[in-house]
Amino acid sequence: MNNSNTLFEKHRAILDAALAALSLRTYYSPYPESPRAYAEDADGKAKAWISAAMNNNYVALDSTGANGWIGEEVSPFLQTGIGVQYPAFSADTLLKNASLVQTEWANTSVEARTGLLIEALDRVKNRFFDIAYATMHTTGQAFLMSFQASGPHANDRALEAVAMGYKELKSVPESAEWVKNMGKFDLKMNKTWRGVPKGVSLVIGCSTFPVWNTVPGLFASLITGNAVIVKPHPKAILAIAIVVEELQNVLAENGLSKHIVQLGVDTLDKPITKVLAENPIVKMVDFTGGSEFGNYIEQLPKTTFTEKAGVNSIILDSVKDLKSVLGNIAFSASLYSGQMCTAPQNIFVSKHGVQTAEGLVAYDEVVKGIAAAITVLVDNPKAGPGTLGAIQADITFKRVLEAKNLGGNLILDTKAIVNEEFKDARIATPVVIELDKSAGGIYNKECFGPILFVIKTDGVEDSLALAEALVQEKGALTCGAYTTDMATQNRIAATMNNAFVPVSFNFTGAGFINSHAAFSDFHLTGGNPAGNASFANSEFVSKRFVWVGNRMMD
Amino acid sequence: MNNSNTLFEKHRAILDAALAALSLRTYYSPYPESPRAYAEDADGKAKAWISAAMNNNYVALDSTGANGWIGEEVSPFLQTGIGVQYPAFSADTLLKNASLVQTEWANTSVEARTGLLIEALDRVKNRFFDIAYATMHTTGQAFLMSFQASGPHANDRALEAVAMGYKELKSVPESAEWVKNMGKFDLKMNKTWRGVPKGVSLVIGCSTFPVWNTVPGLFASLITGNAVIVKPHPKAILAIAIVVEELQNVLAENGLSKHIVQLGVDTLDKPITKVLAENPIVKMVDFTGGSEFGNYIEQLPKTTFTEKAGVNSIILDSVKDLKSVLGNIAFSASLYSGQMCTAPQNIFVSKHGVQTAEGLVAYDEVVKGIAAAITVLVDNPKAGPGTLGAIQADITFKRVLEAKNLGGNLILDTKAIVNEEFKDARIATPVVIELDKSAGGIYNKECFGPILFVIKTDGVEDSLALAEALVQEKGALTCGAYTTDMATQNRIAATMNNAFVPVSFNFTGAGFINSHAAFSDFHLTGGNPAGNASFANSEFVSKRFVWVGNRMMD
């Protein structure tokens, strides 16, 4: 622990920059998102690392007290098991380990925790290429997205949580002398305050973004002094295992117990999630995944942070240049085969068409244009495979193949394209289905994967009303809107914002509604049915500890 | 509304001072707590005001749409009805009114809200004497406490909530230009953020502190843009009616609807609280009162802030001067006849006695000393009536009269003392009962009112263990501890703080564990069973709105 204050000083500049970014909400990232910014041999080393990792035990993780080795991950690119085996712990062992170190971590100063956690992020940075390949071969994300989403972008979100936690924990002083003049004398008290951690925290990962969606809760709980059990999705463990390994190493090097962060692996057949979540030792649960399980988590009598399913809409009213808009939408819908929580599903278009700088484009032309833009993207042998990646789960793959039977007019069916590097990859291009506005039974629910509905409405007000009704019922992570009319823009903003959904207006070029930037964009608002948390507002950290003050008189 | 920015500027200095105090947690109060600090004729005017108010309709409140006049308050000092009648609204009318003005208030700027609310507190300040008499004749608090608790101390808490809300709402900028260098070009977005109010707020008052416990939630909801329905306890309306009246006046003078703050009065026979609380229009509920109803409120699918019952302990280990300590405890237990949520109930004393500067005092002597200190206080014709006040409710009075039958050794029974000013006052001095540590069935629950248990333990560690077990199960607002040993102090602090209970050490003289000072002491921690809220941590305001951001590209 002697090292911890040194670590705080070492990382003070990055903390200060992160705090400034959080206040200004301007662009900030200390971890470059381009693979080219890293060592030349990093990619080669990572390829060697993952070859060695496959079909082997992950021995770099703490395995004291493990009762065996388990793992059942399947690469969506290879469609074979990757064979990595992780130490298996009983729920009891995980809970007992966490309980035993909770006080140790709670008593570690805020500065020490900050230094240790940013140091761990530094170590994780050196593993970005390992993490990229681990993410690829579990989620089906293409390399660049695997690298960026699980590497720098996830580290950004983790640092954001650390900085927000530091800020909140420093918002009340450690002590004060309180003096009240009572007329003839002064009443004096010495007061102290401490943000007391709530206790053991469970962070439940998802199959598609095993790092990006796990580290905010993980680092938020850690900075606020809570021991964490990370429970990854059984099909997406390897990438977050690397993060846990690096955290454990930094803790151990500084004389702290590795049990402050544990990886609790399970299998689909023998899940341990509910046993962990329901145990009274666990005071907090972070969850990313389906709405049914998320609703179960939310009703537990503890502090919960959820990201569940939502249905994201695009309202297409009027544009400057339709081609660039349709290209942008096509990319948003195709990126990682629509398996992002921020991917658009419903595109609301007026039956009267879309006004553009070159005049009105008829509704039918717009629908065809969307399909054409997707075809151009996915058929491009350079861009297609790298954009789509692979389909993470069989169930998603089946849903896409059967989407043509959902109803409505099938405008573009899914198809397979060739990924030259991974011939066996599970690939499905986006389906486009046109629906009448009356077909809410089809489009008013999440159809996870590359399935896009174009919904014919009576005009932009109708589009907005349908989109709003949908978010009130199902929630949304994001909403895209295209309009050149400022009054319309204001109406869309007011309506969707009052339903607690953020809106991205007139995105073209390199701006995509899918992307939420750390230190600037809140991911989720926590106010609509898509989830009760927000990465990272002040509540995302302040709910993890309790202010307790003592008063002393002489 | 033109006036609102002027009001913000007018009150800017007080806001800045409040923000500074919140950060430093040093003493601050802009509203003097001594009645002598106010106009000489204020008391006389207030006496005339309450005489006129009694047996009359409270016409100063907005009564548009009322379906009659109701009121059933009884003065604990006179033991007769005070006859004030308030406009009665159906729950539907209250909810409809609130819904209709929610957007108007949400669209009022943060600065305008801040100015309006601090202006209202200024107007309330001019009514402190009216509020004092209104509080006396509903709660039974003696004049000085009525004045201070419902007047300056309540205003302090209201201002604290306003300042905390302002701080949180300003923690994210209204807009930013976000520029990300993409290598060959810059990706630019204009971003905006808004704290979107969650919606209509219900604030449920209690019978003993109708202002102090209502204004934190009321002002926290208002500063964050939510229309509020105040639902006072049917037996304690008059004092908070004055606050609502002043808020309505300031709103109306500035062109805003009075319905932004409504008073929803009901009677014990025809309560409207559950109808209001369960209606989906109501998004937030603040509640102070019993644990059973509080638990019901907490399980509603909305944002809730509760203060419920707790059991407060004193751990008496070692002292410098026993007499001053026992005098302090006697006052804490007698103040407002123990009807404070922060009053002590259980005093844990080692069977080995209490170490003092003059040597060991035997256990039996300590028990007798507690009773003697209470007798000295209540028998003092000057101090007794002014400290005890009167018993608010018949049920409390009966509980005290029957306390001698609870079990254990009756050390001091309750008795009546004479209040020269109010001969008919419902008065009961504290009961002191000695219990063995095995009598948890008696002392491990709240016995609201002036009932004090002295519990004989095996030593300070035993006292601490019993106190901790109690707060884990029942919660507590406060804990007093007396020890001259620093190691013991640290153990008590660590143990109770980890159970999320604050500790006041070695309080004597004018320092009482009952008092929580705004801007410095958190009232409740929100972390133990006594309630889920804390006046006023950041969550107390941040849970009332949702951050939503929009992004615009050209």
Image (spheres, coloured by chain):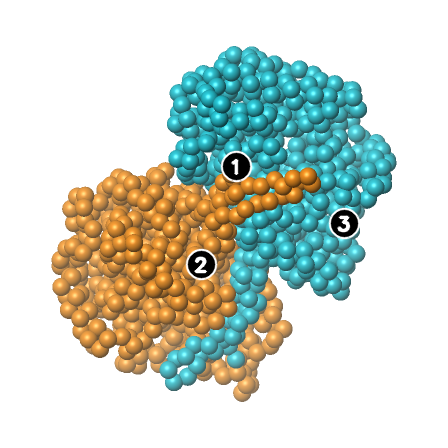
Chain colours: A cyan, B orange
Mark 3 vs mark 1: give the one in front: 1
> Could you tell which of marks 2 and 1 lies nearer the N-terminus?
2
Give the residue pinned by disc 2. Answer: B164
Residue at the extreme front:
A358
Give the Cα separation between the discs numbered 2 and 3.
38 Å
Task: Quote the CA–CA distance across marks 2 and 1.
Answer: 36 Å
Task: Tell me if label 2 and label 3 are in contact, CB under 8 Å.
Answer: no
Q: Residue at x 43, y 68 (%)?
A: B17
Q: Which residue is mark 1?
A: B554
Q: Residue at x 39, y 67 (%)?
A: B13
**Left or right of B24, for residue B405:** left
Position above or below: B545 against B323: above
Say which residue label 3 marks.
A123
Read off the chain for label 3.
A
Q: Answer yes or no: are tags 2 and 1 on the same subunit.
A: yes
Observer-nearest of B135 and A358: A358
Element at label 3 = helix
Q: Position of residue A63 (x, y in %)?
A: 79, 44
Mark 3, residues whose alpha carbon is within 10 Å: few (<14), some, or many (≥20)?
some
User: In the rendered image of this protein, does residue B362 appear above or below residue B235?
Assistant: below
Real-space Cα distance between discs 3 and 1?
A: 39 Å
Q: Nearer the viewer, residue B478 or A208?
A: A208
